[in-house]
Structures are given as C-alpha cells and as structure tokens.
Image (cartoon, rainbow, N blue to C red):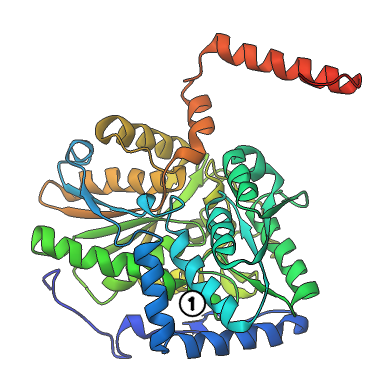
Amino acid sequence: MHPTERATTAGGSLRDQHGPLFGEYGGRYMPESLIAAIDELSAAYAEAIVDPAFRDELASLLSSYAGRPSPLTEVARFAEHAGGARVFLKREDLNHTGSHKINNVLGQALLTRRLGKTRVIAETGAGQHGVATATAAALFGLECTIYMGEVDTERQALNVARMRLLGAEVVPVTSGSRTLKDAINDAYRDWVASVETTNYIFGTAAGPHPFPAMVRDFQKIIGEEARQQLLDETGRLPDAVIACVGGGSNAIGMFDAFLDDEGVKLYGVEAAGDGVDTPRHAASIERGRPGILHGAKTYVLQDDDGQTTESHSISAGLDYPGVGPEHSWLADIGRAEYIPATDDEAMQALRLLSRTEGIIPAIESAHALAGALRLGREMGPDAVLAICLSGRGDKDMDTAARYFDLYDAEALAHDVTEESAAEQAASKGEPEL
C-alpha cells in the first residue's frame, strides 16, 4: 500500500479508540474517594469536546497564545548522518513554554474553568508540564501546586525557578526514587484531600480513564498538522514517524493522525538508560510486562513479585516505569514498534543536532533523534522520516555541559568556592553579601 493510502481494520479506524480500554489495557483502577471527581471530569470532557464554543476557544488559544501551527523543518545536514534519508522535525520546541505540553494543558485548564474549580495540581518530571501548567494557571487566575521528585528538582532547577516565577508552589517529593512516579503518587494524595476545589491536570497519556484518551485528543494536533505539512512539502507521507516515549503524550499526539496509514511505520523510542540488559533503564514496553500503575493497566517495569521497580534515564521526562495504555495496545497489535536508545546515544544525538542544525533539543527529544539516526541508516536515502521534536534543550544545559565537559574549569571551581563560602557564612549566622 502506498504511504498516502488510508487503511482500516475489521473493527473500523484505529483512531476510533476512545477508552476506557485499548484492547486489554487502560481502565480505571482508582480509590473510591476519586471516582466521583473522575466521573465529573469525564462528563465535562465529553460535553466540551463537542461544544463549538469550547473548541473555538481552545483553537484560538493554541493559535494566539501557544503559537500554533508549529513549523516543520527539514534538517539536511543532520540527515547526512542518518543514511541520507530526508529528515523532518515537527517543531514542538517552538511552542510557548518550549514543548508540546502546552497543547494539553490549555485544554485541561479550560475544563477546569468549566468545572468551576479554583485550583489545579500537576506532576512533572522534566518540568515542562509543570511550567505549562503554571503558565495556564497564571493565564486563568488559578491557584497552582506542582509535585516534582526531589531528584528532578535538582537536575531541572531552571524549570523549578520558572514555575515559581509564574506563581506556582513547587513541592519536592522525597519518597521512593524521588522522580516522576513518586510525584504522581503525591499529586493523587493531594487530589483525594482537595477534590472539591481542585482539578488534576495530568501531564501524559497514561493514568486512569479518561486521561489517556483526553490527553491524546489534546495532543493529536501535532500529527494532524505534521501530516498535512509533509504532504505539502514532499507530496507524500513519510515512511516512518518517530517520537520519544515515556508516558507517551507527544508520541501518541504525533502518531494518531497516521494510525490508519498502513504505509507509515510508527516508532516510539524508549529510554534505555545504561542499556536494557542492565537494571538502569526506563524501557517499559521492551522490558516490562502488563501490570497496574497509577490507575491503569499497561506495560510496567516490575520484579518477579509484581512490585514496580525503579526506572532510570538521563532524561527526567522519560524516567518513568510505565507507559500510556494506548501505546501498550499499539505494541501488542504490531501497529507501532518501540525501540530503545541509551543515555549516551541520546546525548550524542543531542550534540549532533546542535552542531549540524543549530537546534538544541531536549534530552527527551534526543532519544527520538537517536532512534532516527539508526532507522535512517537502515531505510536508506530514499526514505522520508518525520520526528516529533517534543521540546527544546534550555532546561538540560547543565546536564549537557557536565556530560560533555563544556564548563570552564576555573570558572566552575570559582563557583564551587563561592558556594562553599556562602554556606560557611550561613552556618555562622553571617549575612551573605
């Protein structure tokens, strides 16, 4: 079948899956105390998504505030390292706040107002969803609390400062691995205690129904734009669409428009950390098995007793031991393939794009770039590849600088000395000048 032809299954279009189940995955495994809130959210979303006024206001915000449509950029110099294939980036890094997260947050913020709630909470890993939520809260005049693993507050300190400048309270989570999984746990605890006034703006296409379908629907504008842009630019659809996958919201947003195009291969790139054959990775589909995590059945990293194990990735946004249920289903039916990229492969791809195209990607997005380099070499120079560049790398500059030894040694030593002196002065009760 030619890549521009559309396909359906015996059960209809693959795009017609709205939950609560995607095959055997998804569902709603939640405490009784949150069922009423989730029912309320489900009903509000079902009404809003067919309300012309809601759709028009969201479209207006995406255009005038978020800056959509995001451009499609061909990266010819980068492509020389990918077997000569034509490579295009869907530039979600150019959205307001610097990533794809704003697409979903604006939709959920409008729902919050529709529900009459005055406060929002969110979890965040890399900080991009937290920044987007804090941004929307400022825009809509909502109280905002962001839960973020303590490890992530340290490696994403710039985004912590951005959230606080926007007026949000940032709560470092010190339980468990102190990363995204634990931030979600604490956000759920808050929601149980404050459900009357609070809406939980969930950041990825995971969790209990309706979040996987709702987040996908708010993110699918990525793929819808990209599909038309590629047709306009090349006269055909790509041979492969590639996106990084943690929870998987940017990936499902990119994939959705192409699900019925049988000639288009879909590749999700998971964080392999130190390698999928080591304990330190976040490749939930590659190395996990079905289980329950954060209210949904999906692929989960777990031990022989079914206990969720710790994940690892150099990218805070992919450091999660599960994945959205629609991705689990797409993997099982063979519609999408999920491949690993290690920390080092991602960092090398980040540096390559920076030096060949002048575009510094987020480390999360760099995993998709690493996968594209491998796939391009396999597919050859006649192939067309489309990559979702989910975010920009400003937030990752400290990690990149340390990884590639980019800091001036004398300046770094001076900073450490000043910090030590300030700490000593504070311990003696002396004022810091």
Viewer-proximal residue among 148 and 310: 148
Q: Is residue 21 above or below residue 279?
A: below
Answer with the quarter of the image where residue 52 lies: bottom left
Where does the image place residue 275, in percent across and percent down from the top left? 50, 42
Query: How many C-alpha atoms fall within 10 Å of the one at disc 1: few (<14), some, or many (≥20)?
Result: many
Residue drawn at (51%, 66%), measured in percent from left and top? 105
313 horizontally vs 10: left or right: right
* Residue assigned mark 1: 214
Asked if residue 179 shows in the view, the reply is yes
Quarter containing the N terminus: bottom left
Answer with the quarter of the image where residue 192 lies: bottom right
Asked if residue 264 shows in the view, the reply is no
Residue drawn at (36%, 32%), measured in percent from left and top? 351
Viewer-proximal residue among 198 and 238: 198
Q: Is residue 39 above or below residue 385?
A: below
Q: Describe the element under mark 1 as helix, strand or loop.
A: helix
Residue drawn at (63%, 88%), measured in percent from left and top? 39
Q: Amino acid at mark 1?
A: Met
Where does the image place residue 231, in percent across and percent down from the top left? 13, 65
Where does the image place residue 340, in percent across and percent down from the top left? 42, 50
Quarter containing the C terminus: top right
